[in-house]
Image: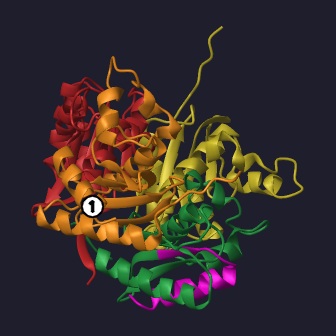
Chain colours: A red, B orange, C green, D yellow
Amino acid sequence: MTVNQTSVSLDDAQRVIAAGQAKATEIESPSNIAVVDAGGNLVAHVRMDGAWIASIDISINKAFTARALDVSTEDLAANAGPGEQFYGIHASNAGRIMIFTGGVPLRHNGQVVGAVGVSGGTGEQDKTVAEAAVAAL
Amino acid sequence: MTVNQTSVSLDDAQRVIAAGQAKATEIESPSNIAVVDAGGNLVAHVRMDGAWIASIDISINKAFTARALDVSTEDLAANAGPGEQFYGIHASNAGRIMIFTGGVPLRHNGQVVGAVGVSGGTGEQDKTVAEAAVAAL
Amino acid sequence: MTVNQTSVSLDDAQRVIAAGQAKATEIESPSNIAVVDAGGNLVAHVRMDGAWIASIDISINKAFTARALDVSTEDLAANAGPGEQFYGIHASNAGRIMIFTGGVPLRHNGQVVGAVGVSGGTGEQDKTVAEAAVAAL
Amino acid sequence: MTVNQTSVSLDDAQRVIAAGQAKATEIESPSNIAVVDAGGNLVAHVRMDGAWIASIDISINKAFTARALDVSTEDLAANAGPGEQFYGIHASNAGRIMIFTGGVPLRHNGQVVGAVGVSGGTGEQDKTVAEAAVAAL
């Protein structure tokens, strides 16, 4: 009766992070990059030299959010602003829900197996880095 | 001089949750469903297979909110957005106040005896599940 | 390269909780009983009528602890007192580590697939309930 | 009048972590390993496959503690038990002070430039991994 859940390994997480890091270097956006597993728990994190301190927490929680709701934080953002159906969700989960761009689910055979979170630049930069990261899974 | 408080029992809570669960299955919206008692304290919770992890906290706190303010979180939402009279209330109570649809008070003989909170889908889906749950009290 | 993780389903969790509940009724120790999955996230919880309010949090966190460290909280307790090697661990994880009896890992084919947490009576009573719960997996 | 602070880079942190990881593999103690910089802020973290979920927080906070007090958590432990001069310190810093073995300052030319935190096994195992990690700076 138990459930089978596929999840990222540390090797997966480090490969994903390395790809994000390469892209962040290329676009000159020093970033924090984090990967969580299928349970929403941190697998690996890096803060590139010069990246913001506040982005440690933000990157980890963008990854948490993307797995905890199986959605990119960019798509969540569209539903989480004033007047939208999920407005106020950022106050839940003890402040761990991030409602701006940079968190993206990691999928394997159609199943969410974890997520990546990037924080370090503009929304556009974080998205670019996250997409490069995800592509390396 | 003492106060008599009627409150849901565990049997009530489980009946309410089972009804919500049946509706959630019917509309294909895997949900977290929680019931709190008259004291706002959790009586029972279920996370259906495949339901979001973030919704554990959200369902419990939608139920808390609906009892703690004796209002549906949908009605609260109408008063909690920017410019409204309760704007900012989601930051109170250590982040336990949820201001979007899915939390509904449970009433018995006109008295609030607890509340149900549902989180798992769109606002519309959560409302549908919560209403089916409440009807089973 | 991904990892396969078996985890309890909601059906599993409810069967485990029902068995614990039956034992708690038998020994007259109204309890909170919680089950978490392989990711440490709550799957289901019940508070029996008359059970302590503080035990909501304690039962959930005993279950979390038993999965988060793959150990019974009773065995952890033996290493977490003054002078022991893990003394102070109760301050970690934002206060979610419970270091007294009542949290037990759920195993399937030798793998930890979740955990149960019981709080409601003496350590001995909680242990008795937890063992009955675990046996039902 | 300004202060110059030498601190670990991400390269340093990853080299330190890799050395710890190799030792953890050798002694078969799957670990969480974290490195913080001179500011006490996380630079990098890995959770090896099979390592405890609770140890994510513990490893990061052992590293924080070792830098925040410029002491190994093993030495701190000797002063933080009941009756000792720093008893109760584990309740400070919002629960971030870890008072058991596994956190060690990273020094360069006699100055603390960060710290490593290891959590995953017994105190003895965590210490062995941390010492291997520190030696790689």
Residue C129 lies in the magenta-colored region:
yes
Residue B90 in sight from this viewpoint: yes
Could you tell me residue D16's position as x and y percent? 48, 50
The three-letter amino acid code for the residue at tag 1 is Ala
Q: Is residue C135 above or below residue C63?
A: below
**Residue C119 position by quadrant:** bottom right
- Local SS, label 1: loop
Residue A23 in sight from this viewpoint: no
Which residue is pictured at 58% across the width and 65% down the height? Answer: C58
Q: In this view, does B66 lie above or below C119?
A: above
Compare residues D83 and B39 and report the one nearer the observer.
B39
Compare residues B82 and D38 and report the one nearer the observer.
B82
Residue sitting at the far right: D83
Q: Is residue B46 above or below residue B110?
A: below
**Residue that mark 1 sits on:** B135
Q: What stretch is highlighted in magenta?
A: C116-137
Total labels drawn: 1
**C41 left or right of A128?**
right
Which residue is pictured at 49% across the width and 50% down the height? Answer: D34
Q: Given the image, what chain letter belongs to the residue carrying mark 1?
A: B
For the N terminus of chain D, give its image quadrant: top right
**D1 left or right of B107?**
right
Q: In this view, does B6 lie above or below B68?
A: below
Could you tell me residue D68's position as x and y percent? 65, 38
**B96 left or right of A18?**
right
Residue D129 lies in the magenta-colored region:
no
Which residue is pictured at 54% across the width and 77% down the height? Answer: C71
Local crowd at mark 1 within 10 Å, few (<14), some, or many (≥20)? few
Could you tell me residue B96's position as x and y percent? 46, 43
